[in-house]
Image (cartoon, rainbow, N blue to C red):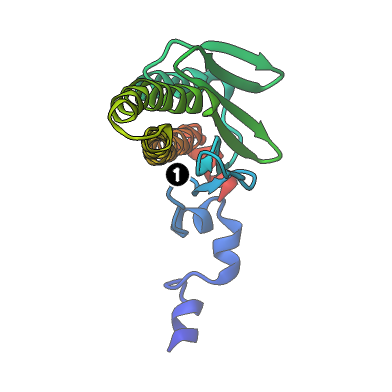
Amino acid sequence: MQQALVEHGLVPTANDGASSPGVGRALSPRRSTAPPAVVVREGPKRHVNPLVGAPTRIVVEVVVEGEMPERDYDLVLDVIRREVGEVGQIGSVGRTFSWSVSNQNRKLQISVMPRGGKTTVRIDEQLGHLTGGIFGGMMGGIGGGVGGAVMGGIASSAPGPAVGLAAWLGVVASAYLGARFTFGKVARGRERKLHEIAKQLGDQIADSLASSEPTDPRKRLRRD
């Protein structure tokens, strides 16, 4: 039956499909353009400072398959400014785009590197200024101010200076432990926020790469 239909021209043969330009392509399903995968990962291994109880540097990296077009760097900059909330400086070396802020409140650098068929975003923040602010403020204010007052009050009524000194050391130790706890909490909060920013940057780059795919149907057919 199939052979009879072929002989009467009612069913196209494989050669007929091949001889008609575009027939095979028209029947094949087209691939939909989806954003590339976004991978957020930790940067180099962080070393915990034993004195402060937490790392004093946070590094987060994002890797997106595909090289982001330079014309869309303004979209990345908009995400950075909106999420960080600081006025930073823009720089570039070759195709690498960077944004950084360095003041008494924050030291943060974000770089975007399209290279080798992928785009890597690196977020690097130094927390050294926080250690000075938190430990210096708490230990100086509580340990020096409160501790000194406690030591003076106890020493004046105690039979010897040892009791007052012990009380002062207790206040200083409490201030130190409180500073470690506070710094650790702030550092973890910064790390979570940087991960959120990294994910948003990765999603923006992925959307940019997806939208930069050719829209001309002839180009899409050649790709497929």
Label 1 sits on a secondary structure element that is: loop
Residue drawn where x is 64% and y is 32% of the image:
114
Residue beneath disc 1: 35
Residue 184: give x, y in percent of width and height.
Answer: 42, 41
Residue 194: give x, y in percent of width and height.
Answer: 44, 35
Q: Residues within 10 Å of mark 1 (few under 14, many from 20)?
A: some
- Say above or below: 56 vs 128: below
List the single residue furthest toward the bottom. 1
Residue drawn where x is 60% and y is 67% of the image:
15
Residue drawn where x is 44% and y is 57% of the image:
29
Q: From the viewer's side, name the closer residue of 23 and 78.
A: 78
Which image quadrant for residue 185? top left
Q: From the viewer's side, name the closer residue of 82 and 32.
A: 82
Going by the image, does 40 lie left or right of 167?
right
List the single residue furthest toward the front. 159
Count numbered badges in the picture. 1
Going by the image, does 67 lie left or right of 36?
right
Q: Give the quarter of the figure containing the N terminus.
A: bottom left
Q: From the viewer's side, name the closer residue of 167 and 88.
A: 167
Q: Of the residues shown, which amino acid type is indicated by label 1?
A: Pro
Residue 132: give x, y in percent of width and height.
Answer: 50, 23
